[in-house]
Image: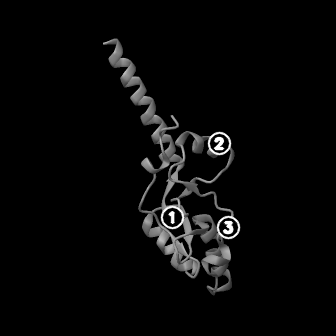
Amino acid sequence: MNSIKVKDYMTHRTVSFSVHMTVSEASERLLISHQTGGPVLDEHKHVVGFLSEQDCLERMLEDTYQNESHYKVVDIMRTDVLAIDEEHSVLDLAQTMLTNKPKIYPVVDSSKRLVGVITRSDVLRAIDQHHHAIYEQGHRRFV
């Protein structure tokens, strides 16, 4: 199971944000992408934070009450991001997901640059496909 790598199941085309974007711009990007969150990148594509729909919702609601919009992504992003290497084992990530709550993990290469994201659904799909492959191999042996 350790041979199942994150890079084989991650999403390569993901929504990402700049620290300088307004929360309104980031919210629009989330809505268009139909994703629930994404990594915040610096100018070198290094992950410096994470922004979720919930983060945006809280600030957009506050902006509505105050009738102004002044927050930037850097003001509300989470900086305690659990990014993982693309060579990471899906099984190890599944174990991590049992104790940590992020639903989306940024995936970085050896230079720590963003290459994609992997979600709990992606991990579940990987394990399910692995189980099906094992079943098919075992089933063929008995036929």
Q: Which of marks 3 and 2 is nearer the N terminus?
A: 3
Q: Distance between the residues labelled 3 and 2?
A: 21 Å
Pick whichever, 98 or 5, lies toward us: 5
Q: Residue 114 carries which label?
A: 1
Secondary structure at badge 3 equals loop
Query: For mark 3, what is the residue?
Result: 79
When asked about the image quadrant of residue 95, the answer is: top right
**Residue 110: x %, y % from top left:** 53, 59
Quick one: label 1, few (<14), some, or many (20+) residues within 10 Å?
many
Q: Can you tell which of label 3 and label 2 is closer to the viewer?
A: 3
Q: Which residue is drawn at 33% across and 18% down?
A: 140
- Amino acid found under the numbered disc labelled 1: Leu
Q: Disc 2 vs disc 1: Cβ atoms closer than 8 Å?
A: no
Residue displayed at 67% across by 67% down: 79
Task: Give the mark nearest the N terminus, 2 or 1.
Answer: 2
Disc 3 residue crowd, few under 14, some 14–19, many 20+, Cα 10 Å: some
Q: Name the mark on residue 98.
A: 2
Q: Which colour scheme is used?
A: one colour
Q: x, y percentage for residue 10?
A: 46, 52
Q: Position of residue 100 (x, y in %)?
A: 67, 49
Query: Which amino acid type is shown beneath numbered disc 3?
Result: Thr
SS at mark 2 in the image:
helix
> What amino acid is at disc 2?
Leu
Which residue is pictured at 49% across the width and 48% down the height? 6
Spatial distance from mark 2 to mark 1, Cα to Cα? 23 Å
Percent x, y for residue 16?
50, 69
Dot 2: within a 10 Å radius of its alpha carbon, few (fewer than 14), some, or many (20 or more) residues? few
Instruction: State whether residue 23 is above or below residue 101.
Output: below
SS at badge 1:
strand
Image height check: is 60 above or below 85? below
Q: Is label 3 or label 1 in front?
A: 1
Label 2 vs label 1, nearer the camera: 1
